[in-house]
Image (cartoon, rainbow, N blue to C red):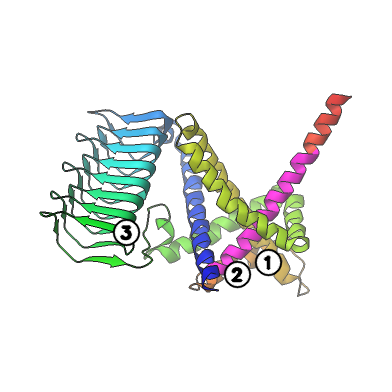
Amino acid sequence: MGVFFEVVRDVSTMHERARAVTRLVLVVALLMGAVGVAAAQSTQAGGSVVVGEGETTGDLRAAGGTVVVRGTVDGDLRGYAGTVIVEESGVVTGDLQASAGSVVVRGTVERDLEGASGSVSITPQGTVGGDVSVAAGDLTIAGTVDGNVKAAVQRLELAETASVGGSVEYSSDAEFDRADGATVGGQTSPVDNLSVDSGFGDVVEGPLGLLFGVYGIVATLVVGAALLVTAPEFAESVVTEVREHTLRSGGVGLGALVAIPVALAIVAVTIVGAPLALLGLMLFGLLVFTSAALAEYAAGAWALSYTDVESRWASLFVGVVGVGVLSQIPVVGQSVNLVVFLFGFGAVLGLLYRRYGRYRSKTTGATAR
């Protein structure tokens, strides 16, 4: 049973981060519609994304084979790439959040460094003004970190030139190499089952967690209402699919929730595939949020089936608010939220697959005639 709950916790975390990414995608999409070119300039994708020396840009989201900062990012940098590099002349005035094969800081990150990567390196010239919180294969610190270090890694190295102002926490099973001369202002301690905030799920954590929870309920209600108006037949089909094929829907949802991000990550490490992976990430996020709204609508319809109330709008309200409130309960809430989502996600994917199959059959038949 312990293994089961570990799996539920890990997959639930993936689900929460996917929904967090979706909310960010929706916000970005709204901003792009409102300010057009200005918003588009904050997102770049290509084989190589470079902020040149002497160049200054605002908040930047970049996807590519390589993301290089030689100039100034006046704000936060989010990099999805094979390699993310902040050169000696480079400055990121906000947070650096990276999902990459390797991350190298030779310049200055004025706030936090967060992310998931194969390897992370802060060179002797590199400086991080805040905390370092990473999940990686290897973390090498030879430069300066003014805050704390939290590393879920296989190997941690503090070189002789390393300077950490706060404490250092690392995975208890990691290889730890601290050279003579390396300085740490606080405690250095191994931690069992160390969990880190990689920066991509932070919008649902911290003191503003309740606010974002309320925002999530409102956003889900808006999306659900839009679906009931524009695609009522499909919404009802999801309810029927979940009711009649519950286990199949849950299995498909679980498999897809694991497989799709892995496939996108594999595509992202190639130069040609990085832009496609970014597009795929956005589409996946929108699919997740849409499925979540339909899943909670289905949950509401199931709950109201035990009453005399027959209303699509009541089903939507009861499902979204009910799941939203339950999700705030520690441990149990996450599990309920995950199970409801998996049923809806699998049902949506199953329906889309079958409808695509019917469309292909009609197209093939028309071509044959």
The answer to whether residue 349 is magenta is: yes
The residue tagged 3 is 174
Residue 289 can be seen, yes or no: no
Q: Residue 300 carries which label?
A: 1
Q: Which residue is drawn at 55% across and 71% down?
A: 326
Magenta extent:
334-358
Q: Are marks 1 and 2 in contact (CB under 8 Å)?
A: yes
What SS does tag 1 mark?
A: helix
**Does the magenta-highlighted stretch encompass residue 331?**
no
- Does residue 306 appear in the picture of this structure? yes
Q: Residue at x 73, y 71 (%)?
A: 304
The residue that label 2 is drawn on is: 322
Earlier along the polypeptide chain: callout 1 or callout 2? 1
The crowd level at tag 2 (other Cα within 10 Å; few <14, some 14-19, many 20+) is: some
- Answer left or right for 247 relative to 38: right
Q: Which amino acid does label 1 sit on?
A: Gly
- Point out residue 152 in the picture as x, y percentages from the top left corner: 35, 58
Closer to the camera: disc 3 or disc 2? 3
**Image position, residue 322 (x, y; %):** 60, 69
Q: Is mark 3 on a helix, strand or loop?
A: loop
Pick the quarter of the image with the C terminus: top right
Q: Which residue lies furthest to the right in this view?
A: 369
For the residue marked with disc 3, what is the amino acid? Ala
Label 3 to label 2, Cα distance in Å?
42 Å
Closer to us: 279 or 268 = 268
